[in-house]
Image (tube, coloured by chain):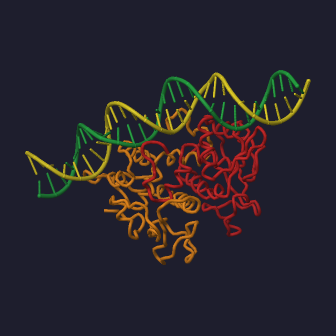
Chain colours: A orange, B red, C yellow, D green
Amino acid sequence: MALGNGYEQQGCFLARALEVVGERWTLLILRDCFYGVRHFSDLLAHLDISRGVLTERLDALVAAGVLERRPKGRAVEYVLTDAGRALWPSIYALSKWGEQHLSGNHPPRVFSHADCGTDLDDAGRCPTCGTVPDVAELVVRLADGPHGSRRSDPVAVALSTPHRMLTPIP
Amino acid sequence: MALGNGYEQQGCFLARALEVVGERWTLLILRDCFYGVRHFSDLLAHLDISRGVLTERLDALVAAGVLERRPKGRAVEYVLTDAGRALWPSIYALSKWGEQHLSGNHPPRVFSHADCGTDLDDAGRCPTCGTVPDVAELVVRLADGPHGSRRSDPVAVALSTPHRMLTPIP
DNA sequence: GCTATGAGTCTCATGACGAGACTTATCGGG
DNA sequence: CCCGATAAGTCTCGTCATGAGACTCATAGC
């Protein structure tokens, strides 16, 4: 946060959180990590983001302990840490807000509890089980409805059918 | 979102939401609105933000239906709409994440249910009543603990003692 | 060994932001 | 009524952030 004025004078943990996840693209990167995306090139293709910015954002998330960087030969995998996973409620809440208060020419993504198949409620609870399932126990699918322009990158293709959250996308 | 590359190609409501609230300072502005801040000059002083950026952000939030602009003589009040209020769970979740996973030299803010005085749990529920109270039914206070540098702007002063959410700050 | 691939690094032009000065309209007191 | 103070902006210019695209380096597989 190098611009002339940062959030340091804000004595509040929302500001602390935004210092980590508030930069352009960061929450969308994390969204993809929740879907199981692990590779730089997949993020690049799915987000249509510049290489320099993606590198910076990933480095910052690793430095903040939100993602872990795991070299695998020439490839690198970026995986959510426990702290990273704990961001799910925030991402879910924002997505839900967007669905309910904004419009888009694309169907929403629906998250269901893998064990019982019930769709989550607005607060991320399974109404059948009465619990808030961990993100690893969710399946995401596209709701029925008119589709906008279809993306053809590997991530979009993998997510066009129901997909277990956090499961690596090949 | 005028930079060369925006979120339009992201067919997802997280992206739609971030188009509205994802810009620098926006969520902190909304945080203050939840505290009851309504005046440009109070936001300016509390956020230490440039006048031009604050104007732009407020205009964008009004255009998006998150805030309502109410002229009152020479003053203007910016008030959360219902859609704006619906952002509380997102802001609360992010703040909680910040508290639990990051460090700061300031105490966290604690939110309690005004009716029964119980502090909310991590999901924003009142454990005593078993419900998720509306933000208007919460009282915010500073937790005990060492204070960083104290701000002296009117908002910080008003929030140094327990304060009902959404209540106008004079 | 060679080619392809993955993850970056780098440059330059455009846009975002901050700092501070200035403007306009309203309010309240003398 | 006039004047000074105040609130909410508007504007300028220098610094930082981002995007687009080219290039580099290391690894993998044939």
The picture quadrant where one finds residue A93 is: bottom right
Tell which of B128 and A22 is nearer to you: A22
Q: Residue at x 54, y 55 (%)?
A: B17
| Visible residue check, residue B20 | yes
Q: How many marks?
A: 0
Q: Is residue B20 left or right of residue A45?
A: right
| Visible residue check, residue B143 | no
Q: Residue at x 75, y 47 (%)?
A: B161
Q: Is residue A2 left or right of residue C29?
A: left
Q: Position of residue B133 (x, y in %)?
A: 69, 63
Q: Position of residue A119 (x, y in %)?
A: 51, 73
Residue A51's place in the image compared with A162, above or below, is above
Q: Position of residue B86 (x, y in %)?
A: 63, 59
Q: Which quarter of the figure is the C terminus of chain A placed in?
A: bottom left
Residue B133's place in the image compared with A74, above or below, is below
Q: Position of residue A118 (x, y in %)?
A: 51, 76
Q: Residue at x 65, y 64 (%)?
A: B125
Residue B60's place in the image compared with A141, above or below, is above
Q: Is residue A95 left or right of residue B89?
A: left
Residue B146's place in the image compared with B129, above or below, is above
Tell which of A99 and A24 is nearer to you: A99
